[in-house]
Amino acid sequence: MKDLVISKKRQKKELIFFMGCLLCAFLLNAIAIMIYETDWSELWTQSLWVLLVCSIFYGVSVVVRLLYYGIQKIFD
């Protein structure tokens, strides 16, 4: 069986994508706190929900990127 090697450049790019998703989820949490005028301690107490939303965002971004590269390969 052939080993799968992920380059350092690709790992860094994926980490940047994940951090972007985490930032978006964190900002959505902060916006929700402002809109619903709840206690700012929820910014930290709801961190598991933020990670869940972040994972969903990352999963969607992976699917979109795979579709993009797949369609790009078809038309090349």
Image: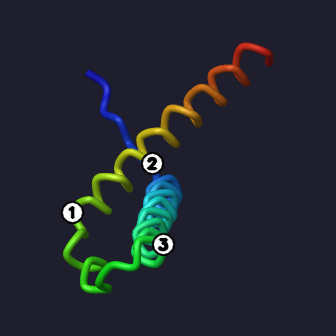
Q: Is mark 2 on a helix, strand or loop?
A: helix
Which residue, given by chain and number where applicable, does mark 3 sit on?
Answer: 35
Is there a contact, CB below 8 Å, between mark 2 and mark 1? no
| Residue at (50, 32) in percent of width and height | 63
* Residue 44, horizontal then vertical, whole percent: 25, 79
Quadrant of residue 22 within the rendered picture:
bottom left
Gap in angstroms between the C-alphas marked 2 and 3: 22 Å
57 to 60, vertically: above or below:
below
Gap in angstroms between the C-alphas marked 1 and 3: 20 Å
Which residue, given by chain and number where applicable, does mark 2 sit on?
Answer: 57
* Residue 73, horizontal then vertical, whole percent: 70, 20
Q: What label does residue 48 carry, if any?
A: 1
Q: Is mark 3 on a helix, strand or loop?
A: helix
Task: Tell me which amino acid carries mark 1.
Answer: Leu
29 to 74, vertically: above or below:
below
Q: How many marks?
A: 3
Task: Tell me which amino acid carries mark 3.
Answer: Ile
The quarter in which the N terminus is drawn is: top left
